[in-house]
Structures are given as structure tokens and as C-alpha cells.
Amino acid sequence: MELLGSDASPFVRKARVLIAEAGITDVPYVQVTATPMGGEERLNSANPLGKIPALVRDEAPTIYDSNVVCRFLDDRAGAGLYPQERLWETLTLEATGDGIMEAAVGIVYEKRLRPEELWWNDWFDAQWVKVTRALDGLERQWMSHLHGPLDMGQVSIGCALGYLDLRHKDRDWREGREALATWYAGFAERPAMVATAPE
């Protein structure tokens, strides 16, 4: 097997953090080019949607979508990052992190792929409102879970916050969210997070 991805993608980073946390050593990471306008042929032939991450398997169809890839790898390794005793909370927290990523990536793609005179500022604002509502919800309701045993909900949130630092530094997501910022400062120091941090 091999994991196809790109360093800057927070969705790929989720899978790479899981691989590191689970101690998986037999799934090499291969960088590919992926864009909404069409990625490289190696990726498109593995995943017809042209999206990353994609987990290429020997003699079996490629698995794609970060949640599917992570569930597969977690199950295969027996890592327990989707714990049954708090499964629905873990999945909801993972979905929250993924939603933050989707909105933040959407802003980046809009600016990168469309001419500036066609940028839709109301759409930018609407995407950022999704991000801020999610961050406020984390600060208000989810800190006890974030401070609990490691699971994929925490990994997703950590990768989402890392992406905000990478692509949206000017928006200062930490303002007014001291508990979340403090949690992330510690979480970002995990070896798996350090090893997968985009430059």
C-alpha cells in the first residue's frame, strides 16, 4: 500500500498523523499534485475524483476520503483512535475539524484559482463565519473531550488549527479562545504533529 497526498493538505495530514500515532511502518507516503482543476495522472487513475488522501492497495480498489482512509488504517492497525465508548463524540469532533478544513481550504482555492476581480468577498466571509462558529463551539463545549485520551476527533481538530496557522495567519483564530489555543499549543508538540507539519 501507499498513501498519495500533498504536505499542505490538512486532510492528508490527518492520515499521516494517524499513521505515526498508530506506529504503522508499511504504508509509504508519496507526494502527488492535486487541485480542483485536475491533479496528476497517477492520482486521477487511483482516485477518479482526483482528491487526496488516497490509499492505494495491492490487488484491491483504492480507498479515498480522509475519513474512510483513517477508519481503514485505524482498524487495520488496531490503534483504537475511534473508541467505541465515545464513538459518536469522536466522529462529531472529527466532522467539526473536517468542516473547518473544508471552509478554510475553500477560501484558499477561491483566491488561488479565480482572478481577483472575480473574487466573491461575501462567500469568503460566509466560509470564515463557519470557521469561527466551529471554533467557538469547541471552546464552549468540547474542551473536556480534547483533553481526554487521544482519538481521531482530536487529530482532526489539531490538523484543522494547523491549517489555519498555515494559510490564514492574518485572521488570528486564537483571539478570544484561550482554552482552545492552550490545548493546541500542547497538541502541536506531539511528535506525529511535528513530523507532519507543512513548511
Image (cartoon, rainbow, N blue to C red):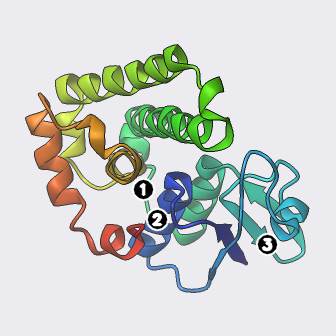
Name the foreground residue: 21 vs 17: 17
Question: SS at mark 1?
Answer: loop
Res 119 → quadrant = top right
Quick one: label 3 or label 2, which is nearer the N terminus? 2
Amino acid tagged 3:
Arg
**Left or right of residue 130, residue 116 in this image:** right
In percent of width and height, residue 150 lies at 30, 56
In the rendered structure, are the residues bearing label 1 and label 2 in contact, judged by CB atoms less than 8 Å apart?
yes
Contact between marks 1 and 3 (CB within 8 A): the answer is no
According to the picture, the residue beneath numbered tag 2 turns out to be 18
Q: In which image quadrant can residue 54 be found?
A: bottom right
Q: Residue at x 22, y 24 (%)?
A: 141
Q: Nearer the viewer, mark 1 or mark 3?
A: 3
In the drawing, what numbered circle is on residue 57? 3
Q: CA distance from mark 3 to mark 2?
A: 17 Å
Which badge, 1 or 3, comes first in the chain's sequence? 3
* Quadrant in which the N terminus is drawn: bottom right
Which residue is disc 1 drawn over?
Answer: 81
Label 1, residues with CA under 10 Å away: few <14, some 14-19, many ≥20: many
